[in-house]
Image: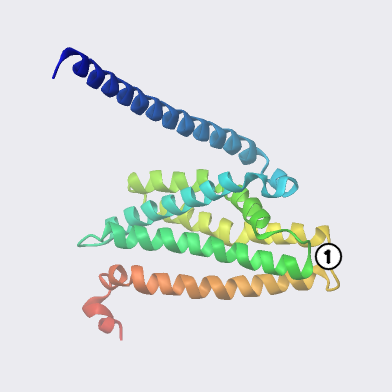
Amino acid sequence: MNTVEAAEVAGVASVAAGDTASSENEAFETVAESLQAYFSFFKTYVQRPAKSINNEASNFVNAVVSMVIFAFLAGVTTFTLMNALSYSGVSFFSVFGSAFIVALVMMVLVITVMFLINKIFGTDYSFKAILSIYGVHVTPVLILIFISYILALAKSYIYAPLLLTGSFSLIMGLIPCYLISSLLTRKSKHVDALYGFIIYVIAIFIVISIVFSIFVDSALGNVINQFVPFGGFGVW
């Protein structure tokens, strides 16, 4: 290889390295901007989550991020607690994966029921708008479930489960009830909003009971059996 060819090869390598570095810098800047945007969103809506009702679908991406973070924290907290309570340990992927998926499924079911009830009895908000409003209201609960995870790591096996249960109660019960009441009373259709609210409560109770029972039976059954003599036969 002569001097000219060597210079050309070196030039191509330099350009390629420059392109790679530029791509990495752009990716880093994109991630940094996304994190900054989410933290700004978090700060705003932790203080005033009700503002999301007026903004409707404008917070869709950050709302989804909050829901995913909640599901992740639910998964790691559940695994930490179950692993500590189990005599032989539990599978991380089994418990974490089940809790993560169930948390997401439950939230999607809550949003779906809210959307349908609101469509029939209240305003004509889109599914995306309902998801955004709900996801924003999940954001403050992240603080509570994060504390639950810290307590689980600190081996606080009384308060950690209480806060974890409280977190699920908020996102599956109190917050959806507050939101559906607020949405239905904004613009009721021919049927009174009270009946829409009652139907919502009954529907979501049935749906969550079914999903939760499936989760307990599939993911936590083996762990629970460790506390029952002879795999459950000893209790009879």
Comparing 114 with 209, the one in front is 114
For residue 92, above or below residue 11: below
What is the quadrant of residue 219 in the picture?
A: bottom left
- Place of residue 177 in the rendered image (x, y in percent of width and height, measured from the top left): 67, 61
In the image, what residue occupies the spot 52% across and 52% down?
67
What is the quadrant of residue 153 in the picture?
A: top left
Pointer 1: what residue?
188
Viewed as shown, does residue 11 lie left or right of 70? Answer: left
What is the quadrant of residue 222 in the picture?
A: bottom left
Question: What crowding class fits label 1: few (fewer than 14 Cα within 10 Å), some (14-19), or many (20 or more)?
Answer: some
In the image, what residue occupies the spot 43% across and 50% down?
73
Label 1 sits on a secondary structure element that is loop
For residue 26, above or below residue 131: above
Viewed as shown, does residue 207 lie left or right of 126? Answer: left
Quadrant of the drawing holding the N terminus: top left
Quadrant of the drawing holding the C terminus: bottom left
- Place of residue 86 in the rendered image (x, y in percent of width and height, measured from the top left): 26, 62
Q: How is the image coloured?
A: rainbow
The answer to whether one can see residue 140 in this image is no
Comparing 172 with 86, the one in front is 172
Viewed as shown, does residue 216 lie left or right of 121? Answer: left
Q: Which residue ends up furthest to the left in the rendered image?
A: 1
The answer to whether one can see residue 125 in this image is yes
In the image, what residue occupies the spot 55% across and 73% down?
207
In the image, what residue occupies the spot 53% across and 31% down?
36
Q: Which residue ends up furthest to the bottom in the rendered image?
A: 236
Three-letter code for the amino acid on which mark 1 is drawn: Ser
Comparing 44 with 166, the one in front is 44
For residue 32, above or below residue 111: above
- Place of residue 233 in the rendered image (x, y in percent of width and height, measured from the top left): 26, 84
- Place of residue 232 in the rendered image (x, y in percent of width and height, measured from the top left): 28, 80
